Amino acid sequence: MSLMPSNPLRDVAWEIENLADSEGWDQAPSLYALVETARLRSDEPALARELGLDEDSDEDGYTAVAQDELPADRDFEDFVAEIVWPPQVHGTAAVLERLMLPPEAEAALPDDQTDLLSYVAEHPDRQEVRITVAVTRDGGAHCVLRLRGVDEVAEGPDLVPGLVSMLRQTLTD
């Protein structure tokens, strides 16, 4: 696990990852709106109280507001591609689980989507990974990756560039 300097985006990404970790594996993807805590407290005091935000809450930080359960009959990527967050949402975050293969397995990846899914699912060296990505309108990003069954976590701004880019698209005005 690489330790990076603390900042509001990293902190909220870890808060979301810790929540996902407490819920265990085999969870559906989840999506969050990231709002500036100070703005939330001033613009939506009732919601801030409901979320447990008080005078001791980090005024410079972000509050993650979980969105309703995502549609089970749609791919996460297709669903997220249709989202456009309103201006008061400063960022967004997502948590999803995927299968990952080692780099040496890439040479044998089939072109056909159905064959690809089967290849990955049946590959003996596959690993399950939980991906937490948080992005902001100002271009910030933080990713946290946790491998299932391994007590190590990786973090950084660009560990999952495709998901970072996809989430950033939801923040365009």
Image (tube, rainbow, N blue to C red):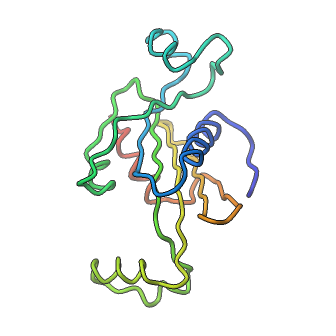
Quadrant placement of the C terminus: top left
- On the image, which quarter does residue 109 sit in? bottom left
Tell whether 16 sits left or right of 164: right
Position of residue 121 in the picture relative to residue 70 (left or right): right
158 to the left or right of 46? right
Residue at horizontal 52%, vertical 44%? 134
- Residue visible at 27% across and 79% down in the picture: 114
| 17 to 148, vertically: above or below | above
13 relative to 114, above or below = above
Judged from this view, the residue extending furthest toward the bottom is: 108
Q: Nearer the viewer, residue 36 or 26?
A: 26
Asked if 126 appears above or below 51 in the picture, the reply is below
For the residue pair 38 and 15, the one nearer the viewer reads as 15
Residue at screen point 38% across, 38% down: 171
Question: How many discs appear?
Answer: 0
Quarter holding the N terminus is bottom right
Task: Report the side of 94 relative to 102 (left or right).
Answer: left
Q: Position of residue 94 (x, y in %)?
A: 45, 46
| Quadrant in the picture for residue 57 | top right
Question: Residue 47: image x %, image y %?
Answer: 45, 15
Query: Residue sitting at 59 percent across and 45 percent down?
Result: 22
Q: Residue 66: x, y in percent?
A: 43, 34
Q: Position of residue 50 (x, y in %)?
A: 48, 16
